[in-house]
Amino acid sequence: MDIKRFALISAVAGSALLVSFTVRSETLHSALISAYSNNPTLNAARAQQRAQNENVAQARAGRRPTIAATSSIGLQSQRSFQSGGFGTGGFNDDFGTASAGLTLSQNLFNGFQVSNNIKSAQSGVRAGFESLRNTEQTVLLSAVTSYVDVIRDRDIMNLQERNTNFSREQLRAAKAQADVGEGTRTDVALAEANLAASLSNLAAAKAALRASEATYLQVVGIQPGKLASPSDAVKYLPPSLDASLNVARSEHPLIKAAQHNVDSGQFNVKVNEGTLLPSVSLNGNYQRSIQAGTADLNADVGSLTANLTVPLYQGGARFSNIRQAKEVVNQLRIEVDETRRLIDQTVRASWAELESARSQTQSAQENVRSSQIALDGLVEERKVGEATTLDVLNAQSNLITAQVSLATARRNRIVASYSLLSSIGRFTGEQVDVAQATNVIPTQVHYKQVRDKWFGLRTTSGN
């Protein structure tokens, strides 16, 4: 009767992984939405991008006039003395002064520096958008990883709990058989050792689960509840390695960011070249002065002047700046090639990892099936004395190991599929239908709001 109970517990353990993958409510998609909205790393990157958006507004300010108002007020005291042959004389005069004025300065031409500054800033903003998309990918992949880590570790903990219960039943049965002379003290000692090992494995599984749940909270922003079984990212993936490489080379945000940085650098070269060209500016000034004293005196003064500046020689610094800017562009072009190679390597590795994970999952499933059959057979043989307690314990240990391997393999397959999706550049919030389900304001919207803004202090966060 006891052996039948052991077999029943083992069968339940064999199906535990499957049950734990189906009875859940919170979905991977909802976890991604939470991470997309609440993750501090991603929110900090968005704030950084909004700050970079202001570079375009600042560059465009070079086309606009600068206007300033000035004023002053004061008190003057004047003492005058005269001397002559018949005596001395003089007069005292105290009077107040006040002035107010306006100054205006307008750049008319400065060697195309303003227009090239604007283009450089625009390219920098585009590079920032792509860097932000890559941060999205990193955070969402971390969310997927933490999600399936919790599922895996909960499954493993459940398996270890069932294994511990099985070990307790084995020890109880071994003691009962020893008491009636059907077993030996060796069988009891083996069962006790097996229970101790099971308790140790259960403690380790609980510790691993706590760590995974803590990581989930840090990445996703909420405590993990009941988690639904996730599917992999196959529906988003290209059908072949070559197709994946082609997508990554044309769409990966790191490559596009590097290309935009080259554009920004080239415009910066033109900005520096513009410092060698003449510049023309228009300056206006109006001032009213008031003097109140013995004799009131008011004056209005206005001027409007055009200034032409032709640079002749500045010690060679501007020529050095141009050479330096060109070398920066050379560096940025090399970094584009480096990024392409890095992305190629990442895609190839991710593809291989996904294929390996699929194969390991199939092998693990077969191993669980075979181990379960082996355990069931040994339990029956133990009834007729053809198998020992040690044989049953070893078979149970093999089954638990196989089930843990299956839980890990399933986790690895899901992570590998999303890693491949990230490596080709298609794991952004918009591309996996996450951004549309949040209230996050895209940084592109902010850019359109501020790129040509003349006035205003408040940011999108209301500060």
Image (cartoon, grey):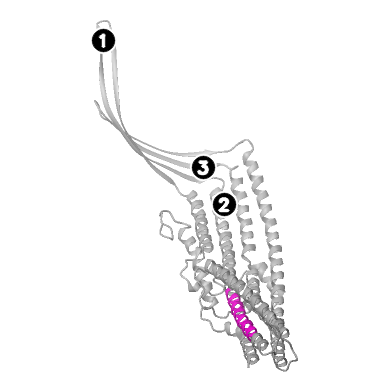
Q: In the image, is residue 13 above or below residue 316?
A: below
Q: Secondary structure at mark 3?
A: strand
Q: Which residue is mark 2?
A: 116
Q: Choose between 284 and 346: the one closer to the eye.
A: 346
Amino acid carrying mark 1 in the image: Thr
Using the numbered discs, state the Cα–Cα distance from disc 1 to disc 3 in whole angstroms: 57 Å
For the residues marked 3 and 2, what is the alpha-carbon distance in whole angstroms? 17 Å
Upstream in the sequence, badge 1 or badge 3?
Answer: 1
- The answer to whether residue 207 is seen in the rendering is yes
Residue placed under numbered mark 1 in the picture:
88
Is 26 situated above or below 315? below
Q: Nearer the viewer, mark 3 or mark 2?
A: 2
Q: Earlier in the sequence, mark 3 or mark 2?
A: 2
In the image, is residue 245 part of the stretch drawn in magenta?
no
The amino acid marked with disc number 3 is Val
In the image, taking residue 149 as reference, residue 375 lies left or right, namely right
Residue numbers of the magenta segment: 150-172
